[in-house]
Image (cartoon, rainbow, N blue to C red):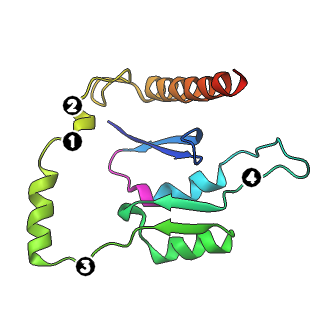
Amino acid sequence: MLAPTDLICDGRGTPSKVSTTAAKVNDLTQTLALVDGIPSVAGRPGRPRCRPDSLLGDKGYDSNPHREKLRKRRILPVISARAPRTSRAWANSATSSSRPSPCSTSSSALPSAGNAEPELHDVFVSLASALICWRRLKKHRS
């Protein structure tokens, strides 16, 4: 069974690093591996830049140990804090998580998780990332 693909992008939405993990793996565990795997970006005079200034994340990435590790790498973590769980908040989140998300019901070029080989999924994700990068370059040169 395939897991969702972990992806890190620059500020304009261009993918910098993509990885696929096993099923039921928390995205938080892949954060530092994705940040460390960002390739060097040349273009300006001097040494190529290989780390971002800041990292944006949603509430799923809220972890004080990971925030500290990002700060040690001189990356500013901009991550939403989780709200304290109350009995009412727990009830609301339980009902909303049982509804299908629009992303899961929409048609996609990627094969579904139940009927695809992991290698094939990786190929499609890499192809989609390459197409995004190519379109950005094409638009930039026009």
- Percent position of residue 123, x then y: 51, 24
* Span highlighted in magenta in the image: 23-28
Considering the numbered disc 3 on the image, is that residue within a helix, a strand or a loop? loop
Q: What residue did someone put label 4 on?
A: 50
Task: Specify few, some or many for label 2: CA neighbours under 10 Å numbering under 14, 14-19, or 20 or more.
Answer: few
Question: Looking at the picture, which amino acid does disc 2 mark?
Answer: Thr
- On residue 84, which mark appears? 3
Most frequent secondary structure within the magenta stretch: loop
Q: Which tag, 1 or 3, sits closer to the chain's start?
A: 3
Task: Determine contact: label 2, label 4, CB under 8 Å.
Answer: no
> Quadrant of the image for the N terminus?
top left
Q: Is residue 125 above or below residue 61?
A: above
Residue closer to the observer: 15 or 126: 15
Considering the numbered disc 2 on the image, is that residue within a helix, a strand or a loop? helix
Q: Which tag, 2 or 4, sits closer to the chain's start?
A: 4
* Residue at image coords 14%, 71%: 89
Question: Looking at the picture, which amino acid does disc 1 mark?
Answer: Ser
Q: What residue did someone put label 1 on?
A: 101
* Residue at image coords 67%, 74%: 72
Q: Is residue 21 above or below residue 66?
A: above
